[in-house]
Image: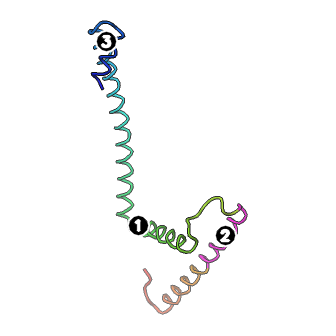
Amino acid sequence: MFEQMKTWLVSKFRNKKSATAVAEQYASDYYRELIQSQTHLIVQLEAKLAAYEAQRSNSVLADIQQLFVNQTNKGIRKYGETVRADNLTPVEWCQHALEEHADSMVYLMALKKSLEESEADGLETS
């Protein structure tokens, strides 16, 4: 690429020395910008990898991530697709969320009752 650019510049400048200087400056600027852009991408990738590793080493976050994967797969099996923003109206989304939270409250209440019974029986829960 550098040689092609230099040849083209020589034809325009009619002076090989000037063409070479311009080509070298252009190449220098080009490679500096390329390295800077790649360095920025490398820094972003390193940050993402660090976050991923921190998440993987935290069993709670890893379990939550796996839960999302499992729920997504379940939704695809059941509905043939993942959640889409355009398949429900805002009111329908609110209703759906309320129903999901109602189910969550039932599960939490059942767990709480079970823990209370265990504590009443003198068993440790932690």
Q: CA distance from mark 3 to mark 2?
A: 69 Å
Mark 3 or mark 2, whichever is nearer to me: 3
Q: Do residues under tags 1 and 3 come within 8 Å of each other at their CB atoms?
A: no
Task: List x then y, in percent, for residue 88.
Answer: 68, 63
- SS for tag 1? helix
Q: Which residue is mark 1?
A: 62
- Identify the mark nearer the N-term, 1 or 2: 1
Residue lying farthest top? 14
Span highlighted in magenta in the image: 89-105
Q: CA distance from mark 1 to mark 3?
A: 60 Å
Q: Which residue is mark 3?
A: 10
Task: List x then y, in percent, for residue 93.
Answer: 67, 65
Estimate how packed mark 3 is, as few (under 14), some (14 to 19) or many (20 or more) residues with alpha carbons within 10 Å: some
Q: Which residue is mark 2?
A: 96
Task: List x then y, in percent, for residue 36.
Answer: 35, 33
Front residue of 3 and 74: 3
Estimate how packed mark 1 is, as few (under 14), some (14 to 19) or many (20 or more) residues with alpha carbons within 10 Å: some
What residue type is disc 1 on?
Ala
